Image (cartoon, rainbow, N blue to C red):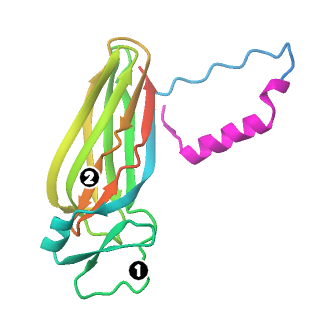
Amino acid sequence: MQFRVSLRAAVVVAAMLVAGGLSSAPAHAAEPAAEPDPTSVYIEMPMERIGVDHEIAEANGYEVHVDSNGVEYAVKEGEANLLGEVTGNCGTSFVYLTAVDTKKHYTSIYTGYTILPSYPGAIYTDWAVGVLDNYGSSTKTWHDPSKPTRFWAKTHGFTSSGAGWVYANVRPGSIATLSNGTICFSGSPTASAYL
């Protein structure tokens, strides 16, 4: 069974429930049906441009400027950015949990990102996924140099010590550094599954 959940949809549903007055339910309302236990959840978040690695930018022929929000951006030497502004996100990041064997409490964690076509490819990835369940926590890390790429994805197995929910979060500070020096922040998506 697979569910695709968007943060925006979850917020809208929660707002509708609150607006509908959860406390106005009849005193003898029937017990709600049990929620299905998701064994596979995929969450995606926008990646945000947070600055520029000056050394990489200069080595590849880019100049570093600052937009009106105080965030650095890279422009090819000799090319003018007439607007003096770079808007929008630089890509999307994801984390995906899928239960491989619920009897053995084993799951696979998939994580990665896609860089938008308006940006050059990533040349370095510094990524970490934190995993938490009822029995403890751990962190899976990747430090990958690469040829410029717009798509990067990795997987890592995880076994829980027993039944229960497991949560995987792309850790704050996970970044992709692009060939023009732009640093794209992961957005820290979080997914959960029941093992």
Q: Magenta span: helix, strand or loop, mainly?
A: helix
Q: Nearer the viewer, residue 127 or 2?
A: 127
Q: Identify the amino acid type marked 2.
A: Trp
Residue at 30% over, 46% down:
174
Who comes first in sequence, dot 1 or dot 2? 1
Left of 179 or right of it: where is 90?
A: right
Looking at the rendering, the stretch of residues picked out in magenta corresponds to 1-24
Residue at 67% over, 40% down:
13
- The image shows residue 153 at horizontal and vertical percentages of 27, 47
Left of 176 or right of it: where is 143?
A: left
- Residue 176 covered by magenta stretch: no
- The image shows residue 133 at horizontal and vertical percentages of 39, 20
Determine which residue is flagged by label 1: 84
- Residue 14 covered by magenta stretch: yes
Determine which residue is flagged by label 2: 152
Q: Identify the amino acid type marked 1.
A: Gly
Classify 64 as above or below 50: below
Res 151 quadrant in image: bottom left
Classify 119 as above or below 105: below
Q: Nearer the viewer, residue 80 or 178?
A: 80
Residue at 61% over, 45% down:
9
Q: Quadrant of the C terminus?
A: top left
Q: How many marks?
A: 2
Kindly identify which numbered label has been placed on residue 120: none
